[in-house]
Structure formats: C-alpha cells, structure tokens
Image (cartoon, rainbow, N blue to C red):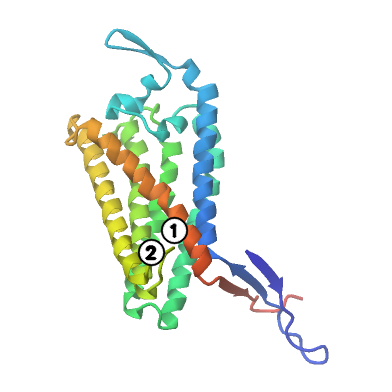
Amino acid sequence: MSYQAVPLGTADGPKAPKPTILTIQVEKLRLISYFGFWGFVAFSVIVSKITVFPYMSCVIDGVDKFGADCTDLKRVFGFNNICINWDYAPSVQLTGMVYPIFEYSFLLYILLDYCQIKNDMLNGIFPAQKATLMKVLFWIKIVLVAWFRMIFICKVTDGPITIGALEIPAVVAHTLGFWGLQWGLVLVAFENVLYLTYRKQGMWCFSPESTVKLAYLYLTLLASLTALKFIWSASIFASGTPIIPNSVARYFDRGWMILAAVCPIFFALNGMKKDPPMVITIVNADVRK
C-alpha cells in the first residue's frame, strides 16, 4: 500500500482540502492475511511444544499416555490437527495475542474486496443485479470470520456454558467458532469464483475458460469437504458416534486444510499480478481551522 497527499486549488484562490490518495493491492492484503494465519499457527506450535505438551499426561485404557495423545480433540474426534497447539494454557493466551494479525488483515481484505466488486458494478464489469446478493454475503462473511475468535474465548478445558436450561459443552462452543470460519471461507471462495466468471480472467498458464472450470471444481470440492466435516463433527456432538469413520474424516480434514489455507496463497499471488490496484481518495468534508 502506498499513499500521497495531493494539493488542490491555487495559492491565490481559496484552498480546497488536500486529499490523501491510498493505492492498495487487494490481493496482496489477502496474501498478508494468510501469512498471518500460518504465522500464528507456527507460533502456537513452538509455544505448545515448549510450554504445554511436555507437561501433559493421562491414562487411556490403563496405559500411560503423554503429550498430544492426551488432547480433548483426540478424545472426542479420534485424531489431532493443528488446533491442539492453541487449545491449552499458556499457548491459547499467547497465540490469542498473535492471532489478530490474521483476523484484522483478512476482515480488511473482505471489506476491500467487496468495495472492489461494487466499483466494478458501477463500471459495468460485474452485473449490478447481484448487488443485494453481494451485500448480504459481505455481512455474513464478516460475522462468520469474526466468530473464529471464539476458539480463544471458549476453551476446551472450560466447564459447560449454561444458558437457561441449555447446557453447551465447552468443546462444542469451541468448535462453533471454527464452523464459522469454515463456512465463511466457502462464501469467500464462492464470491471469488463468481467474480472470476464475470471478469473472464485467466490464472497462471490457464485460459479464462479453463480457469473458470477449475474455479468451480475448486469451489465444489471446498464446499463438499466443509459439509462433510460439519456433518461428521455435528454427528459426534449429537449422538457420540460419528456418521463418518474418524479414519476417513482425518483425510477430509487434511484435504480441507490444503484447499482452504494453502490454495488461496497461490490465488492471491496470481491476483497480485493481474488485478489492478485499488485507489482510495480520502477528503475531510470541512477544512479544519
């Protein structure tokens, strides 16, 4: 991002406000947010290996277990993933301090991406008939992505959350935040694919036509894996028995992580090369005395 102050008016005439011009590459912001994501993941891995897992122990079926074998995630779902690295103190508190680098940059990306689409509507690049859909999706994405912070608020080690006669186990409340991010990323992908369809822009060595086909394939795979992960985890919470074997769900989890947290890095790199930068002009309404 770059900025400059542009003087308006002349020395002899009345001075108009000086606008501040911001030049932003929106996809670069997405790249920064994903680096922020993997950055806080790496941070949590280091912290948990030093301060958490060396001090964890349990007994499972009469056998002494240690470290990652004793996590709530493995107890409930049958296997671990990267989430275990920020599930326990002090890693959950320390990682929560680093996490906003991803959260704020990604929410800002969602905002600016929406502004980019609105501007393309005004210029006839994106169909204006979809304005209501884009507006609704924007607010849903903001809420779902923001909910991810609940993984640091509702810790798996907490007691049940009681709301009147309703009692929500801590691990369920913790997972709700992750569900929000999962579906939020699906909506981001849907919007990206829709935008790509109308811009008719190729990606890397692929033609625009091939790019659109691959984009819809990607969206289908991401949405399908997200739905399967949701159904699998929800079935465990509902009945205690997974509707999909944990041994299979483990691969769904890994596939989803590649699609949701690795592939967008390459999409952002392509967008940085081909998308025009966004120029934002800021002018205060009245000249301050």
- In this rendering, does residue 165 appear at all? no
**141 is higher (above) or lower (below) than 91:** below
Q: Position of residue 253 (x, y in %)?
A: 31, 39
- At label 2, counting other C-alpha atoms closer than 10 Å, the crowd grade (few under 14, some 14-19, many 20 or more) is some
- Closer to us: mark 1 or mark 2? 1
Q: Are marks 1 and 2 in contact (CB under 8 Å)?
A: yes
Element under label 1? helix
Left or right: 227, with 191 as reference point: left
Viewer can see residue 230: yes
Where's residue 248, x and y in %?
A: 23, 35
Q: Is residue 110 left or right of residue 221?
A: right
Residue extending farthest front: 205
Which numbered tag is attached to residue 68?
Answer: none
- Amino acid carrying label 1: it is Phe
Instruction: Identify residue type, mark 2.
Output: Asn
Secondary element under disc 2, as helix, strand or loop, is helix
User: Which residue in the structure is indicated by mark 1?
Assistant: 267
Residue at x-position 16% and y-position 36%: 243
Res. 192 mark = 2
Disc 1 versus disc 2: distance between alpha carbons? Answer: 10 Å
Residue 286 versus residue 66: which sits nearer the camera? Answer: 66
Residue at image coords 41%, 30%: 84
> Which image quarter is the C terminus in?
bottom right
Front position in the image: 212 or 204: 204
First-in-chain label (1 vs 2): 2
* Residue 232 to residue 196: above or below: above
- Count of picture labels: 2
